[in-house]
Amino acid sequence: MTIPGPGPSRLAASFEALPPERAFVIQLLAASDGDAERFAGRAEHVASGEAARFGSIPELIAFVRHVLASEGTTPACETIRGGAR
């Protein structure tokens, strides 16, 4: 079975362009009410420790953009949507 996509050398080269200081951990909540369209969870920037809860894809993207825009100047802190952990 052949998996489509870049070959091993191209794949390795693409990972070289992914610096670890731009890494995020994304935790997704399971939809307990059966709403498969719900997209919520928590994101954390690995290098700074800055974290935020999100309730939608646009909120997640806004957090990532915010962190990357201030990359290198963000202190290790946690911002939680709604004020609770």
Image (tube, rainbow, N blue to C red):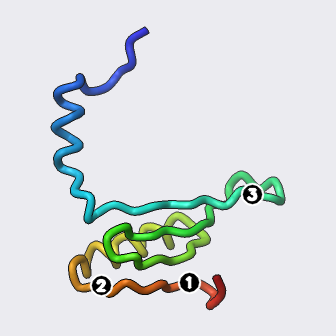
Q: What is the spatial separation of the Cα atoms under label 2 and label 1, in whole angstroms?
A: 15 Å
Q: Residue at x 58, y 84 (%)?
A: 81
Q: Position of residue 43 (x, y in %)?
A: 49, 68
Q: Which mark is residue 74?
A: 2
Q: Residue at x 31, y 70 (%)?
A: 47
Please say if the residues under marks 1 and 3 sit with CB atoms less than 8 Å apart. no
Tag 3: residue type? Answer: Ala
Of the residues under marks 1 and 3, which one precedes in the sequence?
3
Q: Is residue 23 above or below residue 84?
A: above
Please say if the residues under marks 2 and 1 sit with CB atoms less than 8 Å apart. no
Quadrant where the image shows the C terminus: bottom right
Asked whether 45 or 7 is in front, the reply is 45
Outermost residue toward the right in this view: 33
Quarter residue 9 falls in: top left
Quarter residue 82 falls in: bottom right
Asked whether 57 or 83 is in front, the reply is 83
| Residue assigned mark 3 | 31
| Residue assigned mark 1 | 80
Position of 74 compared to 44: left or right? left
Please say if the residues under marks 2 and 3 sit with CB atoms less than 8 Å apart. no
- In this rendering, the label closer to the viewer, 2 or 3: 2
Asked whether 21 or 66 is in front, the reply is 21
Q: What is the spatial separation of the Cα atoms under label 1 and label 3, in whole angstroms?
A: 19 Å
Quadrant where the image shows the N terminus: top left
Q: Position of residue 77 (x, y in %)?
A: 42, 86
Of the residues under marks 2 and 3, which one precedes in the sequence?
3
Position of 85 compared to 68: left or right? right
